[in-house]
Image (cartoon, rainbow, N blue to C red):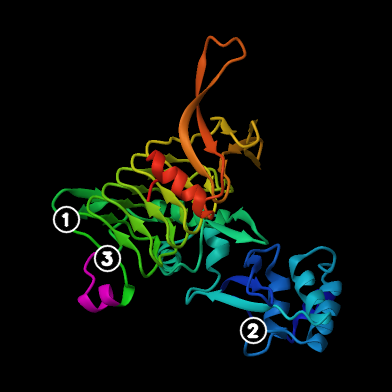
């Protein structure tokens, strides 16, 4: 028996674990550790030193750090950071996401999952237990195994007849659901709405007629409105209380794995006939007809400067992700070239914070504030 195996002998198996979320004492997400080979041994240690409430005491944390040192995972690994905080008396809480199917995530990540594997993974997506992006330490991080799981599902299933006019691989999320299941979900599905399986729709969401929600999407609920003919595309992340105006859409992503999906944070409002690609931060508002796209300039009237996009590398490609700052109103507009002879389509951020009553009244009088 090797030293590493001996060090792990007293810790439980994690074969059914999919991932581990770590919250700080204030309830903020500090780490997401998927059960994949780079993390598996460290996850086993964390899982073994937690108490029944998912917390780790100082003495247990010290023992865990000793084991991580033997595994050579004590320098900079997120598990070591969690244990160091516990030693210092800042006890983080661990939340385990598990599946009845053992070894699920490793096969999914290799895109070698069976039909049973892919359906077990979609159960996790439907429950909201795994997401295409997680906000960790205040920063959105892509979770590539979700893309792998969706593509694995496509590969493991053949197209079949769905209804009178459908020929597809992915059924509707609520197909065949009972009245009791609709009631338990707490979501209003207006007649004619279409929501594919493999997405999460939180309680308190309204999905209106002809609206569409695609596989991998995650909608927090708690007052979300997806209005008539709006489109929530693959893997998009929608926060609490978001209003998505009629005919508007948000960009989806399925490849490459590791690319950040489009995100609309809590209480943001998207006007009618908008197109969203990138991140709309908390409480921001897009006036009707605004089109976000990679490479499109966002001009801040308050500062007279261009808001730089996030630059996110995936392999050899760098993606430029546009960002609408929190509690700002964005409208359509244009910017003149230096020559003054050519205008370029742009997004304009109007001055003022939308949490300010006078600012709200000013925009309402102008008739440009989507409510």
| Crowding at mark 3 (Cα within 10 Å: few <14, some 14-19, many 20+) | some
Residue 47: which quarter of the image?
Answer: bottom right
Dot 3: what SS? strand
* Any part of residue 262 in sight: no
Label 2 with label 3: CB-CB less than 8 Å: no
- Nearer the observer, disc 3 or disc 1? 3
Q: Which contiguous range is marked in magenta?
A: 175-183
Residue 40: image x %, image y %?
68, 69
Q: Residue at x 54, y 46 (%)?
A: 328
- SS for callout 1: loop
The residues bearing labels 3 and 1 have C-alpha atoms spaced at a distance of 21 Å
Task: Identify the residue under disc 2.
Answer: 54
- 234, above or below 347, in the image: below
Position in image of residue 324 (x %, y %): 55, 43
Q: Identify residue for label 1.
A: 163
Mark closest to the chain's N terminus, 2 or 3: 2
Q: Which residue is mark 3?
A: 188
Is 103 covered by the magenta stretch? no
Q: Residue at x 64, y 84 (%)?
A: 54
Picture quarter containing residue 203?
bottom left
Residue 142 bears which disc, if any? none
Query: Mark 3 vs mark 1: which is more N-terminal?
Result: 1
SS for dot 2: loop
Q: Residue at x 78, y 65 (%)?
A: 77
Q: Is residue 176 left or right of residue 364?
A: left
Does residue 227 appear left or right of residue 40 in this picture? left
Distance CA(mark 2)–CA(mark 3):
34 Å
146 shown above or below 13: above
| Residue at image location 49% in from the left, 34% down from the top | 293
In the foreground, 198 or 368:
368
């Amino acid at each position: 028996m090797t030293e590493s195996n001996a060090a792990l002998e007293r810790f439980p198996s994690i074969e059914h674990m999919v991932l581990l979320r770590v919250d700080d004492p204030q309830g903020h997400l500090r780490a997401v550790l998927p059960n994949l080979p780079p993390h598996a041994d460290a996850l086993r240690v964390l899982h073994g030193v937690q108490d029944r409430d998912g917390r780790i005491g100082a003495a247990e944390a010290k023992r865990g750090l000793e084991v991580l040192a033997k595994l050579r995972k004590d320098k900079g690994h997120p598990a070591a950071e969690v244990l160091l905080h516990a030693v210092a008396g800042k006890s983080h809480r661990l939340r385990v996401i598990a599946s009845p199917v053992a070894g699920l995530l490793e096969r999914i990540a290799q895109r070698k999952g069976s039909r049973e594997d892919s359906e077990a993974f979609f159960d996790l997506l439907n429950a909201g237990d795994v997401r295409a992006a997680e906000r960790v330490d205040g920063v959105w991080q892509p979770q590539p195994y979700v893309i792998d799981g969706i593509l694995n599902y496509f590969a493991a299933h053949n197209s079949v007849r769905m209804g009178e006019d459908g020929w597809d691989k992915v059924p509707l999320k609520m197909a065949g659901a009972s009245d009791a299941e609709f009631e338990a979900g707490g979501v209003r599905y207006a007649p004619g709405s279409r929501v594919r399986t493999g997405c999460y729709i939180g309680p308190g969401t309204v999905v209106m007629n002809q609206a569409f929600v695609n596989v991998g999407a995650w909608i927090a609920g708690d007052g979300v409105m997806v209005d008539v003919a709006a489109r929530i595309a693959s893997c998009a992340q929608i926060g609490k209380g978001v209003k998505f105006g009629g005919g508007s859409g948000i960009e989806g992503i399925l490849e490459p794995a590791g690319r950040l999906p489009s995100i609309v944070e809590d209480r943001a409002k998207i006007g009618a006939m908008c197109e969203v690609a990138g991140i709309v931060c908390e409480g921001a508002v897009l006036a009707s007809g605004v089109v976000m796209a990679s490479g499109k300039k966002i001009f801040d009237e308050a500062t007279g400067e261009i808001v730089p996009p996030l630059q996110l590398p995936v392999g050899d490609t760098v993606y430029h992700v546009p960002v609408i700052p929190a509690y700002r109103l964005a409208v359509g507009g244009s910017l003149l070239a230096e020559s003054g002879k050519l205008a370029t389509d742009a997004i304009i951020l109007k001055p003022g914070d939308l949490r300010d009553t006078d600012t709200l009244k000013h925009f309402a009088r102008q008739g440009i504030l989507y409510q």
